[in-house]
Amino acid sequence: MSGVPATAARTPLSAAARLRKGKWYEQPRWRRLGALLALAVLMAQVTGEQGVRNDLFHALEQNFKGGGVGVWVGIAVAVWLIREFFDDAVARGVSRLRERAGGPARTVRATSGRLFGRRGYRWGALGALLLVLIVLPLTVTTFWQQVLVDQIGVYVMLAVGLNVVIGWAGMLDLGFIAFFAIGAYSSAYWTGGLPVEPPVELNNFLVIPVAVVTCLVAGVLLGAPTLRLRGDYLAIVTLGFHEIVYLVAKNYAEFTGGTRGANGLDRFSLDLGFWSYDWTLDPVPYYWIQLGFVVVIIVLFLRLEHSRVGRAWTAIREDEVAAAATGVNTVRFKLLAFAIGASTSGVAGVIYASKQAFVNPEQFVVLFSILALSYVVFGGMGSVPGVLVGTAFLVWLPQFLRDRVDPQDRYMYLGALLVIMMIYRPQGLLPSRRRQRELRMAGEGVSGADALGARPGGERG
């Protein structure tokens, strides 16, 4: 390269020269702008005028005329400008804010650690929380009382049981709502609500242990033939189990009532001789029953998590082959996970059937299993507090949007929230410490982390 100065060879290309090397729309900057503009148009349609059946372009035309698209496009362009041209300034500002807030935040964490590290303060805080939950239904409207009982309470019990199977034992279950159906139909059968007469009619309180045992047996029956299956194959089998239960309830009309369901089921009642009480349409007493059972279940499951059984489940979830090599009876503990996880569905099913006084196969479609799984993942697999908070929040959100968003769009916001959560916080809302550590190690490619951080062929990235 004679005659060319050495400095000229090292001169970086100008911005125009770099753009000429490739098409302008292939540059990452402009691709990001295109994605944001597409998202803006989508959000304008989601939040704007609703469509009509006889005019496919009505909503699109109205949203463009009304200026909704312009507002969202302006927001998208503003975000793009900040991201592309002021990113360093924003990062420096956020860093300074973190430094300023770091001292008070560390003080708060240290203080809370000292307080909650003491058993007395910790139990006091839990007692105060329980008191708030007890009086909560008395401070809300009848509509929210119904939501607390029929949706939040039921899904909390289901999610806590599903967390045993998915979060602790690491087995994907897509048919968990089938155990809920078994619990509900057990209540209908033993209280005389089905076409078939039971050997003896029982009070709903006495049906609860029977339904729990029935769900335990169903969990064992599901787990026994699937012990050698993992991952996707196990998920397909559990999905098939749900379809079997659903179709039996729908088609075996001589026993279950078929598509008509079972009407006029007995509600909870209590007769102690000197005092009696009958549950009616008021949802508050049902809420208190649910709260009592949830507290008992959480206490038992937390004790179970830190027991030998809980440690065996953790070993199976992290590496089943290694667990078996170290002496863990994987067959036994996987059966226990299926059975114990299904037990909470028995309680939930009896309470739900008594509250509704009606059961029907359409109340137990597979969509509810998917929702329960989403709640567990959103809250944090393996974390009991995370599952409780995540389930309550995600069940509350569509009802909160009831009067603010078109009914057809409510679950769209829920889906968008789940997508965003899985992208930016895959460990969940309140993850367990073990799960959070595994995800961090997998992201760093540290040996011993779980398969979430593995690339095809076993290479870790």
Image (cartoon, rainbow, N blue to C red):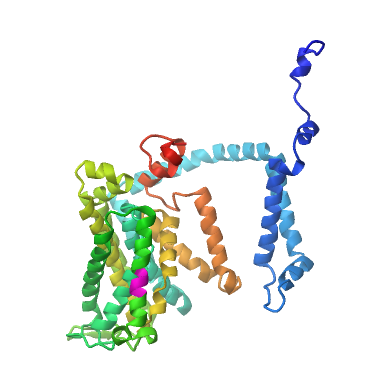
Look at 34% across and 62% down and name the residue there.
237
| Quarter residue 114 falls in | top left
Q: How many marks?
A: 0
399 left or right of 67 in image = left
Q: Which image quarter holds the N terminus?
A: top right
In this rendered view, identify the residue nearer to me: 5 or 151: 5
Look at 23% across and 63% down and name the residue there.
220
* Image x and y of residue 196, in percent: 25, 87
* Image x and y of residue 399, in percent: 51, 71
| Quarter residue 390 falls in | bottom left
Q: Is residue 225 above or below residue 314?
A: below
51 left or right of 434 in image = right
Q: Magenta part of the protein: which range? A: 242-246
| Quarter residue 96 falls in | top right
* Image x and y of residue 231, in percent: 37, 53
* Magenta stretch, overall SS: helix
Look at 39% across and 63% down and name the residue there.
174
In this rendered view, identify the residue nearer to me: 365 or 271: 365
For residue 288, say whether it is visible: no
In this rendered view, identify the residue nearer to me: 222 or 449: 222
